[in-house]
Amino acid sequence: MLKRVERFPLTGNATGQWRDALALLETGFPRSQAELESRFNILSQNVSNQTCEILLQPKSASARQMMPQLKIAFDTKDFSLKATELQFADGSTMRNDFIQPVLNPQITPEMFSPKIEPDYKVVEPLKNR
């Protein structure tokens, strides 16, 4: 509706809040309780039916400034990921629900270069930092 695109660099030379927030995600989800507790504060845990939802807060202060909370939902029987929900500092959220996952699908290079219509405004919020 706003016809605005925000472009963020995903290269290794990014620093600050954005880099700290991405570091939490790109290293993969912790594989042990100790690893989880070293990177996140566990704010709540809720189990309903066959789904466990865990609300996490990054321990890194600069990551919290960009992404104050992260919610993970997984199946309690096979531990498959069912959903992730990121809450950003401006109050917006991004939720991904995983249904009928396919392991290692072919991904075309075009997926990483989406077509942006000419009437959209492209901004790079972190470019001058």
Image: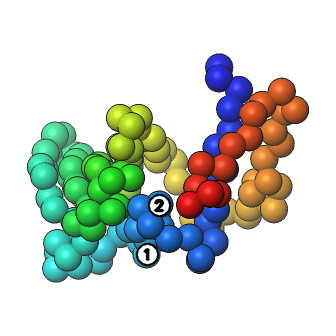
Q: Residue furthest top?
A: 1
Question: Label 1 crowding class (10 Å Cα cut-off): few <14, some 14-19, many 20+?
Answer: few
Residue 72 coordinates in the image, percent (x, y): 30, 52
Query: Taking the image as drawn, is residue 102 in sight?
Result: no
Please, what is the three-letter code of the amino acid marked with disc 2? Trp
User: Circle 2 sits on which residue?
Assistant: 18
Query: Taking the image as drawn, is residue 1 in sight?
Result: yes
Please, what is the three-letter code of the amino acid marked with disc 1? Thr
Determine which quarter of the picture holds residue 28: bottom left
In percent of the image, x 68 and y 32: which residue is there? 4
Mark 1 or 2, nearer chain start: 2
In percent of the image, x 45 and y 41: which residue is there? 94
Residue toward you, 65 or 51: 65
Residue 7 coordinates in the image, percent (x, y): 66, 50
User: Circle 1 sits on which residue?
Assistant: 27
Q: How many marks?
A: 2
Q: Nearer the viewer, mark 1 or mark 2?
A: 2
Residue toward you, 37 or 101: 37
Residue 9 coordinates in the image, percent (x, y): 64, 62
- Secondary element under disc 1, as helix, strand or loop, is loop
In percent of the image, x 51 and y 48: which residue is there? 100
Which label belongs to residue 54?
none
Question: Label 2 crowding class (10 Å Cα cut-off): few <14, some 14-19, many 20+?
Answer: some
| Residue 37 in the figure: left or right of residue 112 | left
| Residue 60 in the figure: left or right of residue 111 | left
